[in-house]
Image (cartoon, helix red, strand yellow):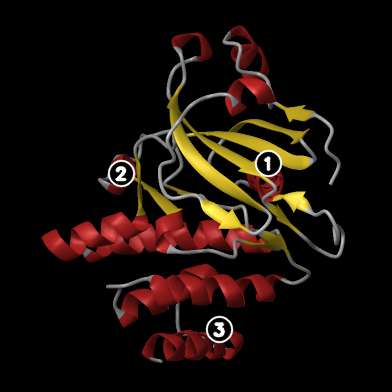
Amino acid sequence: MATGFACHVPEPWGQILRQAGLDSFEAWWALSLDAVEPGNQRREGWSAVSHYRLPEAAGGGSVFIKRQRGYVFRSLRYPWRGRLTCEREYRVLLRCAEIGVAAAEPLLFAQRGLNGDPCGVLVTRALEGYSALEDCVSRWQRDGWPPLPTRRRLLRVIAAAVRRLHDARLQHNCLYPKHIMVNEAWLAGDDSVAAAPVALIDLEKAKQRLWRRHCARRDLDSLNRRSIGWSRADRRRFLGYYLGRRGRLQGGGRRLWRTLAHSVRA
């Protein structure tokens, strides 16, 4: 990987961050911040995520900062030095915006070589007012599940978002309930909220695939296995929404359902 400097700041954030002195790799790399969870270590490097509150000069609000050093992935296109995973995530976030899949908004991506190591910074805006689907389910298991119309409403918008991702032949590759963020105001029945009902996060392992069915096999199986607490009827209903079927599943949809149902029993 080239160790030169590169910085990308999507508008309108360029001018905002320049006024606050936060439009460079150095400004974000130098911040002394604690990681929100234990960082990831590889033989070649590390990756850590921190939370930061923007100054009023930059519009305020919370952001997440992913900083990496030597934390790369390799592919047929980049077999030797590879590319930082935060670079791949940044490009996937831009692609999600193009295809209408809600995700964290990127404010800045920058990379630089330090002592021969590729280093990168990805800054994304926090999803204010959202909760992870995993946390929602934990709450429902404790306090009681929402009524069936609410569950159907939620399953429908999640299925639509995942299908839209797959129609673009993008595979999330870590599609777990903790990576699906739910708009709490929308879930409570407020349809006037401007923000999307659901958003996807943690897209650094996302991959472009040749066929949508490859995306579906991996992502739907991952989500199905880790969706604790959902009934068999809810799971089947979700698949029907994903496939755009209102009635009985047929053909490939039925075979896919058998595979998913078996993986949960196994």
For marks 3 and 2, give the one nearer the viewer.
2
**In the rendered structure, which amino acid carries the disc numbered 3?**
Gly
Which residue lies under the disc numbered 2? 184
Q: Name which residue type carries label 2.
A: Glu
Look at the numbered disc 2 and give the secondary structure of its residue: helix
Label 3 secondary element: helix
The alpha-carbon separation of the residues under discs 3 and 2 comes to 31 Å
* Labels 3 and 2: the sequence-earlier one: 2
Dot in front, 3 or 1: 1
In the image, residue 157 sits, relative to residue 238, either above or below, namely above
Gap in Å between the C-alphas at discs 3 and 1? Answer: 31 Å
- Label 1 belongs to which residue? 94
Can you say whether 164 is above or below 213 in the image?
above
- Amino acid of disc 1: Leu
Name the secondary structure under disc 1.
helix
Q: Position of residue 212 (x, y in %)?
A: 69, 70
Q: Residue at x 45, y 11 (%)?
A: 56
Label number found at residue 253:
3
Residue at x 38% of width, y 76% of height: 235
From the viewer's side, name the closer residue of 89 and 116. Answer: 116
Q: Which sits earlier in the primary sequence, circle 1 or circle 2?
A: 1
Residue 199 in the image, given as x and y percentages of width and height: 48, 48
Figure check: 87 above or below 235: above
Residues under labels 1 and 2: Cα distance? 24 Å
Looking at the image, which is closer to me, 35 or 222? Answer: 35
Q: Is residue 107 left or right of residue 231?
A: right
Image quadrant occupied by the C terminus: bottom left
